[in-house]
Image (cartoon, rainbow, N blue to C red):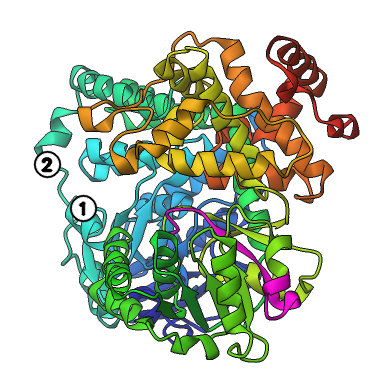
Amino acid sequence: MTDVMQAITPETMTNAPRPEGIRNWRREEKGGILRLWLDCEGTGTNVISEDVLRELGSLLDIIADDRPRALAIRSAKPAGFAAGADIDGFSALRGAAAREKLEQGHAVLDTLAALPFPTIAVVHGHVLGGGFELALACAHRIGIDGVKFGFPEVQLGLHPGLGGTFRLPALIDPVEAMQMMLTGRSAHDRKAKRLGIVDALVPERHVEAALAAAADGRIDAAETGFRAAALRTRAARSLAAGRMRSEAEKKAPVRHYPAPHALIALWETHGGDAAAMQKAEIASFAELLDSATAQNLIRAFFLRRKLKSAGRGADGIDHVHVIGAGAMGAEIAAWSAIRGKRVTLEDVALEPLGAAIRQASKICDAKHLSGIETRDALDRMMPDPDGLGRSRADLVIEAAPEKRALKEKIYAALKDELKPGAILATNTSSIPLADLTPAAPDAARFAGLHFFNPVSKMQLVEVVAHERAAKETLDRLAAFTTAIDRLPARVHDYPGFLVNRVLTPYLMEALLLVDEGRDKREIDAAALAFGMPMGPVALADTVGLDICLEVAGSLRGALDRPMPDTPDWLAEMVGKGHVGRKADRGLYDYSGGEEPPDTPAEDPDEELIDRLILPMCDAGVECLRKRVASDADTVDAAMIFATGWAPFRGGPMHYAETRGHSAILERLRMLEGRHGPRFAPDPGWDDLG
């Protein structure tokens, strides 16, 4: 629980009435300061929708005539100020309709910005996207400890569209403002104060005093300083824009992600003229909204929401016991504790337990937890070398090494220890649940809970069912996944489950290409050109060549589809300990300073790309045919959020649909003729229509 949530509670909010005909705002006056409380009807989170802005506009018309001492805008939601724009409302808009809605929204915020008395946004929690732009339209911003500002629009293939492109650079250092918008990175409370986003940063108990000071003109707006003045010239902006373009191209190539480059062009061309920038922002936003990139990234947003909906409900899990304090177990324990669960962590050795606590502290730092939050998280995570937590836990997660006999031994010891109703979940990634279930204390309360490494960064968790798992067990595990702020992908037991089954052909084909004599850098650069976050050779090194060898062997013996043997030299490398980045040497020699390419190939070999990508599409079809995943959306969502699979293409199944199933089939058959039966199309293509 954050400091904000501790300070901002329903009791500190308002019971002020909603004006007649208004559904999303509450109004109250105290000490001559008029307060508008944003309180979107029927939801626990505020979003900036068309209705919210239209109602604000009608309220501002009245307020302008009332001439209060000051106007304060707050959120009545404990969770935060606003989570951004209403994506449901604008995602279907196109062309002239999009521009019209944007112009209407701008008119409301322009009215707010022009009011002839102090306007103050009092913000807490998340202040994102359109919520941030609403706050920027006020003359002052008072932040409550723990507040976090951000423009995540770039993650949707867009840039700010309600004035953020010109109001933030006018408020703070323009280069800092552009970096926030270009990267989507957020500014937490102290950084926001340092940058000048907030004029005051206070605890909740001091808000009234800060409000009175702002109303009386005793809080000064931040000065943008010399750098802002220098960048008012086109020549100076062009110099800075050139550097921005170069950096943006490395992370977001313009051919795949046009939004950052459109934003840079806006600022470079119109940065010295707010009116021109506003007009250009509206036109640019509407154009980007029409792009395939934005539509696919918005689709990914909805896929994320769909996964979360699969984990609704109470999990009934307060105490988690993790068996195994290796890399995965330590991260699972730490993340569960950070997200509010009581955790006991068991291992046969003391050293991994100490390392796990140190790792948990590092994760807290990386997640910008306060000292109090870090202390509380570490207090919830207890080393348990004697396994006393086994009998008290609501959920026991086995994260032991991938050895069936070891896992079965652990399960045997748990038979008389688990309390009634407790769930046992395995984090196995390669052993079929069908092989482990007979050893489980209660098959109905046993399932897979497959996290990805590192847990603190990877968003997806596979909730793996088997024939004897109870629906209640799977529902609770999905709800637990959501409760610890991860995305549950419900899948069924199958070799590799879903993600590894689809990803493995990508890695294996890269190894075969290397075996053919293709340059590893060419292979990785081609994958980057397609839009993958990491080339397959680099990914194999990152995963570990030993793991790749193990997974390939387990799949080869379990699938009814052809899977080629791995090259002999792979086993030799593993035998020498050259297993990848963790050993400083794999397919790349990191000890000698060799690094994989980080820029896409300019003119990639299209057949090479198809050899890497199409087998993943085919494996996705196989998983649908085998009912490993319930639908194509689950395949796409799992691959995007577990592997970063080219999100601007919408996922492997959406990519196949966009390119055309018949075209994919034709290409697979051509590759089959050239390279063998591993490219033979799955029979499930015929069922896709």
Along the viewing direction, whichever of 520 and 86 lies nearer the viewer: 520
Q: Is residue 312 above or below residue 545?
A: below
Counting from the top left corner in percent of width and height, residue 68 is at 36, 69
- For residue 408, side relative to residue 61 (left or right): right
Q: Which residues are magenta?
A: 438-455
Q: Which residue is mark 2?
A: 225
- Residue type at mark 1: give it: Gly
- Residue type at mark 2: give it: Gly
The crowd level at tag 1 (other Cα within 10 Å; few <14, some 14-19, many 20+) is some
The crowd level at tag 2 (other Cα within 10 Å; few <14, some 14-19, many 20+) is few
- For residue 452, side relative to residue 675 (left or right): left
Secondary-structure class at tag 2: helix
Q: Quadrant of residue 102?
A: top right
Q: Which mark is residue 196?
A: 1
Furthest-left residue in this view: 226
Residue at (24, 18) in percent of width and height: 238
